[in-house]
Image (cartoon, rainbow, N blue to C red):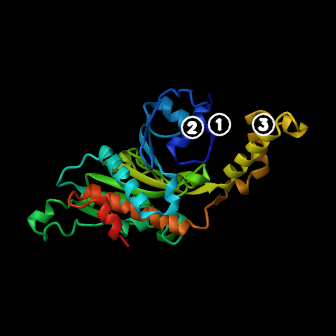
Amino acid sequence: MQTWEHLNPFTDLALEATAAARGDARTEIPGVTMREERYEHATVSWVEVLDQVGEQMIGKPIGNYVTIDAPELRRRNRDLQEQVGKVLVEQLDKLLDLKENDTVLVVGLGNWKATPDALGPRVTGKLLVTRHLRDYVPADVAGGLRAVAAIAPGVLGITGIETAEVIHGIVERINPAVVICIDALAARSVERIGTTIQIADTGIQPGGGIGNKRQALNKQSLGVPVIAIGVPTVVHAATIVQDAFEAMAGSFANTKPFFDLFRSPESRRQLLNEVLSPTVGELVVTPKEIDDLTEDMAKLIAGSLNAVLHTSVTAQDLLRHIN
């Protein structure tokens, strides 16, 4: 079994990193546990990194990673989206331990000018923000509304300010019980774009999946728990080429002398690195329908968060009314 540095599968998803480290589905990874639960329209996988050995094996910090996989979301069926929203609400309830009077800060990470990176800002634009209203609504209504604040701080290239600096200042000022960060992710599989949601209680490092790592947003840096919610919107072009090459190598095994030279995974990986670097290796791609996929996921996540944060509303009601 190889460590993360040798595998390097270009992904933000703990589930994909775990699969790459395992190789064989029956192989156990030291310091990492995994379990799975199936629903009618989704599969929920829990990956827990227990210690530093697990960190090294899959390249993810110690903590819990929940992946909701719902391939049928590409059908853009509203009833299906509502069912997946219920699953997301259930998983968020397990990770969030909120009291009635807690303040929650939701941060929409990303660049609103670039569609594949606009998930976070789109989610914050659809949230029911209430921190400024708590003192003015009737008591019977206020009981079902938690104090929620939201911000989309932009990216360093637009604002000239590190996202972590902005968030740190807000956290010091409003003292939230938890920060929830929403961001677009990079996946290793094209099929996961717009169909997979990852929730993590370890925080997030913006830009990590595309090699543009910024300062981490986590409990260590902000002083409060940080929950990260992400959806894959891009894949590395190199992984698509690698998958195609692997398929070709399998198809022509023992029939073509050329492929005999690259029978081992290490030799194939070395060849691809030589061919693709340095240009294609840095290229990320996204499907042409990414605008619709991003908008659908923004509605689903915003509706689910509204239902989790405000006990007087349901995910189904909010999904139906979010524009």
Q: Residue flagged by tag 3: what amino acid is it? A: Ser
Kind of residue at disc 1: His
Q: Are marks 3 and 2 in contact (CB under 8 Å)?
A: no
Q: CA distance from mark 1 to mark 2?
A: 14 Å
Residue at point 57%, 51% (across, down)? 187
Disc 2 target residue: 19
- Quadrant housing the N terminus: top right
Binning the other alpha carbons within 10 Å of mark 2 as few (below 14), some (14 to 19) or many (20 upward) gives some
Q: Which structural element holds mark 1?
A: helix
**Residue 240 locus on image (x, y percent):** 69, 51
Q: Nearer the viewer, residue 55 or 311?
A: 311
Q: CA distance from mark 3 to mark 2?
A: 20 Å
Query: Looking at the image, which residue is at 42% across and 31% down?
Result: 50
At label 1, counting other C-alpha atoms closer than 10 Å, the crowd grade (few under 14, some 14-19, many 20 or more) is few
- Which mark's residue is nearer the viewer, 3 or 1? 3
Query: Residue 254: where, in percent of width, then height?
Result: 85, 33
Work out whether 225 lies above or below 55.
below
Residue 57 placement: quadrant: top right
* Residue 95 in view here: yes
